[in-house]
């Protein structure tokens, strides 16, 4: 970190790149420092993800049925709204993060408290609004708790947030065919430019229509990669996080069957980050299968009534650390 | 409007190119009007998935009706034939330029406009919630009258999504289905949905006698009323398809009648029997049920009724995939693998199917007791409830449920009879 921590000299030459639209690596580095992340609300998971899923990037999450993909989708939809930096700080409860976050706190104040909205694109028809409500309620409760913890002085700011308000900030699109899905993704750019406060786009799942309605695989590959490029551009232009949920299929390689994410090999190049959720004994785990900047690692998480959390033993430690603060 | 002009121009050019009239204008049109294309135009032909082609144009009728109920608009109602949208969106911009002989700028703005029209409108999650609570009876759940299970599932079997019962033969799947059928047909004053039930009985296991027995024992106050037995039994319509094609046909038939005839529950019992043996794990890309899965899902969603399906079990084959390649590399322990493949049963319909269902209930027998487990649910924690089958159908032995850790919630034991 020492090299990267050298203070940035005001260098005007940086701005004058000799090719319009290009960026120097140095500029990109500065930009990365300013990157916000959306917490997964599970400290261990945030840890391996470098603080949460990153805005400006496309992250793919896949796993077997019932592992918690959609649950994570809900969590992002709701927490996308409260990229509350104070909350982030406390949710992590990890001192190392504070330094890094100190940089991030400078991020535009307009979503210092109340952050962006979310777009939830449901291709499967399995959106359970009751569950989203449960998570929103838990989120509001947590925030009140942390708010009280932060401001022990009496001038406690009244957090007027209601779970219903959180749900009101999720734009829900129901997509019934792959044509609609392509149209949706083309249209997103316009929609987001009209709703600038959208901070996260979740597609649950990217797979369904492309898995069953195509028999021309070449066309499928082309359409899919076109979609991925558009999503990356969207993420970059509007600094929002794109989360794609993917299903699992079986794949034959090296003489045996393995599980692998659906849509084939060419698709696996399409996303910037790929996280696989899997069972490890009795624990649910997340594994970073692919990322340009993070080492591959895995971390346990659990699905609770409140959403996604650390395993019970770990969260106890977290609570204690918070109590000490 | 400029955009509209461009669309009609594109539409015109596409249809002109193909030398036939598209279904332009304000009329809603069939999305498949391209099927009679000449095969010569090979680069332009969108090939619909075979199942969809079989369906023909009537498929969009049910969809449209359902969608109207949701106050949404279909593409076809907006004067834009779906096929046009399809082409414009799956071709690249350069292909479109070549095809239409217009410049890139025009193509880009036309594609953007087509996308905007073809994209469905949004709802906020809040309005969705309010709609469910206010408009729908019982907040969108069919109570099973098994208290613990209803509490775990936030009220019962949810409307609009698929609920699956998995378990070995003779465990009580059909008993559960019979009871649910009764509950859906009961008058509202007795806590039912007061509607009709369509029961697709693939393996001829439906027994009217048994159903009435369950009814008489569980709801004596209803069934001892004059004429009520006939009334209740008359509300349940049983279909018995004998093959996959018959099954496909009956699905297509019921989609319209569901909307017209106050059908409040769809049960599909023993669907996996239709493809047993045909479906093996392997390189085949298309699942034999791929079409059925999405059809039943959309049926459930557009009509907003609960759909309950049963799935059989088969023994796990030794080369069954249960891990990712990175897991094997990092561990290399074969011991667990062997114990796992021991004598476990797995659901007959594979992983593709399992992704499609929203709630999965596993029924199993373990050390002399029967358990019903909430194996997949967006709402409920992984709970297991001991149950028994009595003369009044399935009853829970206790309503608290045992929370299960890890993937054992998914395993299916069958001890006792094997």
Image (tube, coloured by chain):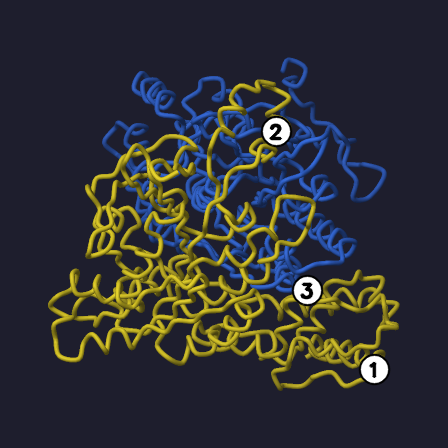
B126 shown above or below B103: above
Residue A33's disc is: 2
Separation of residues labelled 3 and 1 (CA atoms): 25 Å
Chain coloured yellow: B
> Marks 1 and 2: same chain?
no
Label 3 vs label 1, nearer the camera:
3
Chain letter of mark 2 equals A
The residue that disc 1 covers is: B16
B235 shown above or below A303: below
B319 shown above or below A123: above
Q: Quadrant of the N terminus of chain B?
A: bottom right
Which residue is more in the foreground, B211 or B232? B211
Which residue is more in the foreground, A82 or A315? A315
A101 shown above or below B235: above
Chain coloured blue: A
The residue that disc 3 covers is: B49
Q: Give the secondary structure at mark 3.
A: loop
Q: Quadrant of residue B324?
A: top right
């Amino acid at each position: 970190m020492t090299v990267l921590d050298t203070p940035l000299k005001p260098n005007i030459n940086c701005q004058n790149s000799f090719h319009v639209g290009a960026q120097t690596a140095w500029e990109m580095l500065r930009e990365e420092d300013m990157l916000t992340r959306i917490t997964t609300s599970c400290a261990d998971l945030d840890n391996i993800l470098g603080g949460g899923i990153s805005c400006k990037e496309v992250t793919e999450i896949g796993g077997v049925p019932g592992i918690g993909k959609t649950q994570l989708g809900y969590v992002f939809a709701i927490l996308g709204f409260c990229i509350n930096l104070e909350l982030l700080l406390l949710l992590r409860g990890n001192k190392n993060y504070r330094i890094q976050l100190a940089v991030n706190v400078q991020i535009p104040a307009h979503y210092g408290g109340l952050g962006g909205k979310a777009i939830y694109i449901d291709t499967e028809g399995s959106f359970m609004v009751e569950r989203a409500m449960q998570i929103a309620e838990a989120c509001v409760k947590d925030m009140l708790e942390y708010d009280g913890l932060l401001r022990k002085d009496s001038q406690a700011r009244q957090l007027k947030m209601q779970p219903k308000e959180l749900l009101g900030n999720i734009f829900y699109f129901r997509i019934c065919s792959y044509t609609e899905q392509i149209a949706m993704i083309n249209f997103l750019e316009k929609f987001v430019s009209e709703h600038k406060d959208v901070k996260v786009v979740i597609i649950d799942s990217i797979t369904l229509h492309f898995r069953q309605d195509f028999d021309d695989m070449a066309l499928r590959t082309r359409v899919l990669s076109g979609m991925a490029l558009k999503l990356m551009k969207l993420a970059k232009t509007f600094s929002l996080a794109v989360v794609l949920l993917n299903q699992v299929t079986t794949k034959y390689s090296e003489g045996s069957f393995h599980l692998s994410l659906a849509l084939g090999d060419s698709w696996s190049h399409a996303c910037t980050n790929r996280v696989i959720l899997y069972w490890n004994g009795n624990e649910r785990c997340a594994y970073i299968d692919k990322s340009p900047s993070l080492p591959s690692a895995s971390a346990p998480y659990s699905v609770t009534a409140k959403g996604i959390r650390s395993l019970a033993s770990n969260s106890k430690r977290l609570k204690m650390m918070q109590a000490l603060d | 409007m400029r955009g509209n002009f461009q669309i009609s121009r594109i539409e015109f050019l596409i249809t002109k190119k193909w030398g036939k009239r598209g279904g332009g204008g304000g009329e809603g049109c069939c999305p498949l009007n391209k099927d009679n294309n000449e095969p010569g135009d090979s680069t332009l032909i969108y090939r619909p998935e075979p199942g969809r082609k079989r369906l023909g144009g009537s498929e969009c009728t049910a969809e449209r009706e359902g969608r109207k109920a949701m106050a949404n608009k279909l593409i076809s109602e907006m004067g834009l034939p779906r096929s046009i949208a399809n082409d414009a969106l799956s071709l690249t911009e350069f292909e479109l330029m070549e095809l239409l002989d217009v410049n890139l700028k025009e193509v880009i703005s036309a594609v953007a406009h087509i996308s905007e029209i073809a994209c469905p409108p949004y709802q906020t999650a809040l309005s969705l919630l309010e709609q469910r609570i206010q408009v729908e009876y019982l907040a969108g759940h069919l109570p099973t009258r098994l208290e613990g299970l209803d509490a775990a599932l936030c009220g019962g079997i949810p409307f609009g999504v698929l609920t699956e019962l998995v378990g070995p033969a003779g465990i009580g799947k059909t008993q559960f289905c019979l009871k649910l059928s009764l509950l859906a047909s009961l008058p509202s004053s007795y806590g039912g949905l007061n509607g009709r039930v369509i029961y697709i009985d693939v393996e001829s296991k439906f027994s009217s006698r048994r159903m009435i027995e369950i009814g008489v024992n569980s709801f004596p106050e209803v069934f001892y009323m004059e004429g009520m037995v006939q009334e209740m039994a008359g509300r349940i319509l049983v279909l018995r398809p004998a093959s996959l094609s018959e099954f496909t046909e009956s699905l297509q038939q019921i989609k319209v009648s569901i909307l017209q005839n106050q059908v409040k529950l769809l049960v599909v019992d023993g669907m996996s029997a239709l493809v047993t043996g045909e479906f093996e794990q392997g390189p085949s890309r298309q699942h034999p049920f791929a079409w059925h899965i999405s059809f039943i899902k959309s049926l459930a969603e557009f009509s907003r009724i609960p759909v309950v399906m049963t799935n059989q079990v088969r023994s796990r084959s030794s080369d069954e995939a249960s891990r990712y390649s990175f897991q094997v590399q990092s561990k290399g322990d074969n011991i667990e693998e062997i114990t796992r493949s021991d004598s476990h049963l797995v659901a007959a319909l594979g992983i593709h199917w399992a992704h499609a269902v929203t709630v999965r209930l596993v029924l199993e027998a373990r050390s002399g007791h029967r358990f019903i487990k909430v194996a997949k649910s967006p709402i409920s924690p992984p709970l297991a409830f001991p149950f028994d089958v009595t003369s009044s159908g399935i009853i829970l032995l206790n309503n608290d449920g045992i929370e299960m850790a890890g993937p054992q919630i998914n395993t299916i034991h069958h001890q006792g009879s094997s």
